[in-house]
Amino acid sequence: MDGNFHQATRLEAIHGRFDPWLLGAAIALATLGVVMVASSSIAVGEDLEVGPFYFLIRHLMFLGLGVALCLVAMRTEMRTIEKYDRLLLLGCFVLLLAVFVPGLGHTVNGARRWINLGVSNFQTVEAVKLMYIVWLSSYLVRFRDEVNATWGAMLKPLGVAAGLMLMLVLQPDFGSLALILAITAGMLVLGGVHMPRMAAPVLVILPLLAIVAIAEPYRMRRLTSFMDPFADPFNSGYQLANALMAVGRGEWFGVGLGASVQKLSYLPEAHTDFILAVIAEELGFAGVCLVIGLYALLVGRALWIGLKCVEMRRHFAGYCAFGVALSIGLQSLVSIGVNLGLLPTKGLTLPLVSSGGSSVLMTCVAIGLLLRVSYELDRAQRQVARLRGEAAQPQEAPAPEPARGTAPAAGAAARGTSRLRQRIEPTLGRTA
């Protein structure tokens, strides 16, 4: 019993390490974001008469608060997070309902997506995405076998997602709606859902999404204008036309940091939704490849960590890593596609790079969650290696001491000799 106690103590004393690739990619993106927000927001701040560095200071404040929240997430055990999964799901619906409360909800351009916190507005769906990922990860752990075998277990998360999507339609926020649906589908596939059975709900949901997309005239204009933005460059194609001019002007290596022309009141939302166009103009094709490479590293590493967690039967941590990777990967993919004219214009920021409040905060929390998963995975791998190493060592019984006056058995090692090399002791009454 005493040996078991000491073994448990040794295992608990083993610490993990945070994945350096994840940490490095996140720091690089955040640093690039600070530089580009400073470059792209000066003209916007002067036009709004709030000062040239207003948006930079605001971005740094939210980034600092986000780093603090990231550190909290990095120090929180995954089993503690899993314990509150149902409360987090309830919080998703409470936050989405809060935007409709008079005095608390805040409307911008006809959309009710924010709540007023006094010092700033907070877009609730940014927190909802992460909380929903945690709940869905816990659900897939609890019903892992049923999700693959029964209709009910598969349809329940789709029903929850449909409830969240309905509330997002009322705001309206079609981009976040599509993102939550994509995260749900991706995590169900990674969780082992029966693919032919899942095809039926997909065939029902896709036509409904198409109807929602074309129900509003402004959405229909967005869907058609990206095909040829220069057909109406001063109206429906204005944003994309200026973004493409910025991208084309940057060529291979850009016009130089701070030398963008399109950010000077020509390109709308140059510091938020269209910050990649400014990067393309100032840093060129090389800068865009750098951004894409950093996101590929971050998302790819998160998926790899999730796979290793699942292989070690740490399914909750693995599914959380999958969900965060899908969220960051899909959002960055859509934002990059919009800036390059590959997708219809949609108001999604570039994670960790675009200026913003709630998006920066919750992305930092998501990175903290990923780093915690990597820490616990590394700790588990070290503990398993310790156990295997101890099991591989032969448990030899101590040899009995010879009686006084007798010689030790031939070949027996004397006490105090080296482990690497046996020492030969002389024997009495025997000649060399």
Image (tube, grey):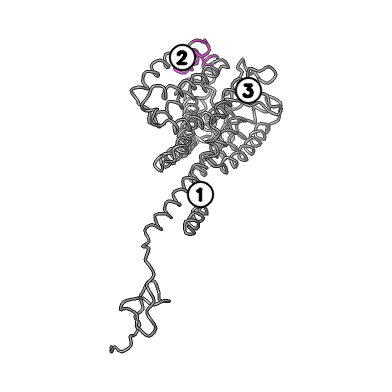
Q: Earlier in the sequence, mark 1 or mark 3?
A: 1
Q: State the separation of the CA atoms marked 2 and 3.
A: 28 Å
Q: Earlier in the sequence, mark 2 or mark 1?
A: 1
**Is 82 a magenta residue?**
no
Q: Quadrant of residue 300?
A: top left
Secondary structure of residue under mark 2: helix
Pointer 3: what residue?
114
- Residue 123 location in percent, x, y? 61, 25
Label total for image: 3
Asked whether 1 or 84 is in front, the reply is 1
Pointer 2: what residue?
224
* Magenta residue span: 215-236
Q: Amino acid at mark 1?
A: Arg
Q: Amino acid at mark 3?
A: Trp
The residue located at (63%, 20%) in the rendering is 99
CB within 8 Å, label 2 to label 3: no
Pointer 1: what residue?
17
**Is residue 346 placed above or below 326 in the rendered structure?**
above
Taking the image as shown, residue 392 lies to the left or right of residue 111, namely left
